[in-house]
Amino acid sequence: MRGSRIWKHYRRTLERFDKPGWKKFASAMAALGLGFLLAIYSNIFAEQGRVAATALCASCALLLSGYVALTAVPYLVRRTRLEWLRASFEYQLTREGMVFVAIVLLLGIAALNTGNNLLYLVVASLLAAILMSGVLSLAVLSGLSLDISLPEHVFARRPVPARIRLANRKSFFPSFSITLSGTEESRNGANQKSRHGSPEPATLSDGNRQILRQPLYFSFLPAARASVRAVELQFPHRGLYREEGFALSTRFPFGFLEKKLVLGGSRNLWVYPAVEPTEEFYEILPLLNGELETFQRGRGNDLYSIRAMLPTDSARHVDWKASARTGAFKVREFTREDERRLQLILDPRIGTLDERTLQRFEAGVEFCACLAWHFYEVDAQLQFLCQDFQTATARAGDIIYEILRFLAAVEPSAETPLAPPLVDPDEKFYRIVFTAAPHGSIPTTLWSRSYFIFYDSLRSDELSGWASGRTTNSFPSCRTGSRA
């Protein structure tokens, strides 16, 4: 088994072997060796006073050197892989390295003052150690490739499984003591631009918008092998997370220098708002469902309720058994066949952009995402509206990620909050409206067919978690008015 693996590795090495290039290199070295030999003979002939032989040998040596420089060198350069020259390496002297350099300087001064050959040898050995540290760290970082796989849909404050694969493409030399981290550009660029080109709200900026927030350490990576790590990432806020690149660093072998290889290529990740329901969500959900069922009652197949008969009711809906038991006429009400047709409306106009108002807006966005996810789970007919953005009326499962993607990027507006207009006055829709408008500004026509959630009614003691980046799954309760 081991012999077959060695043979396969040998065959792969032969397949990568550049025979024409090595032939050209061998011929160039032979020509240079012959030129060097002719140069030696020209020196001997010059000492003997043989001018013609000296001129002939020196001329041939120069011609051979020129021939190699004009033919072999460009050919070999074109066939040489130069990826390592394009790689961006950064060097940083560590604390241990500073102490080591100080010792070398002191010994160098002592060697110059005393002229002691032993001190010269010690200084030379120490300088060679620094040189070897740089060469070995370069060999450790070269030939590495990185691949990071993340799920397509990521939610705030929910653990995200990530797969990180670091491969060593070198055939013989392993890599030691490698640290994977984000770049300084990503760390310093916390206040990223959104897709609308304006800075993100202050409540969203937690000082670190990196995808890889903690370094990952690889102690050993064999030659021609890959190491795969499964890690859990967590993002405290919704919005855009960005890496301008990833960095591989090492202090191998002596720790004097920290060499860093920057892998280019930016990576963007949109994080949806948290959709985890809590006790407060379950407190408001029965009220919302009750308003929805009241609005949606009509002529259908499922029994909604039995009530006293009104003069406007049809006799065919009379429940004779209930009427006989009670001694009064009772009629049956049915749910509509097209029930749970909803419009989810988010009004981003909040007026002032102070910290507390922004925190309330963030709580409203997360509550809106939680409701959208709930209606997705119950397979409701849903439409989402937010100023110029509007989805089609469809099954929630068909548009849920379009809604969450918009909620991940939505930003508050400094416009004066007013009562949201009816985009579609169709009576078939029941509307759930998130707004910062004053309570008394809502027209009665809207109250009768809508359920309002006001940003300023969110519990203030729950909002501090959004500013501090709390990662618990708490959710603010809502005090709303559904009808006048």
Image (cartoon, grey):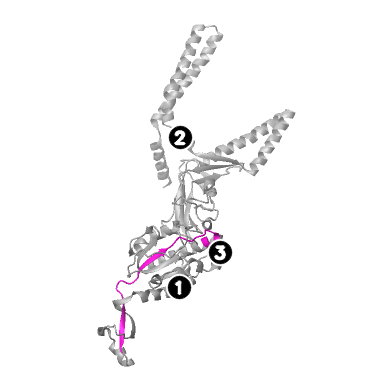
Task: Measuring from the top left, give residue 67's x and y in whole percent.
Answer: 43, 19
Q: In which quarter of the image is residue 24?
A: top left
Badge 3: few (under 14), some or many (20 or more) residues near its Cα, within 10 Å?
some
Q: How far apart in space, not on screen, are marks 1 and 2 (Cα)?
A: 68 Å
Q: Earlier in the sequence, mark 3 or mark 2?
A: 2
Q: Which amino acid does label 2 sit on?
A: Leu
Res 82 label = 2
Residue 110 placement, left or right of 213: right
What residue span does the magenta drawing correspond to? 329-358
Residue 470 appears anywhere in the view: no
Which mark is in front, 3 or 2?
Answer: 3
Is residue 251 positioned above or below 406 on the image?
Answer: above
Q: Name the residue under label 3.
A: 464
Badge 1: few (under 14), some or many (20 or more) residues near its Cα, within 10 Å?
few
Q: Which residue is drawn at 40% across and 72% down?
A: 444
Q: Are marks 3 and 2 in contact (CB under 8 Å)?
A: no
Res 481 label = 1
Is residue 296 positioned above or below 424 on the image?
Answer: below
Which mark is in front, 1 or 2?
Answer: 1
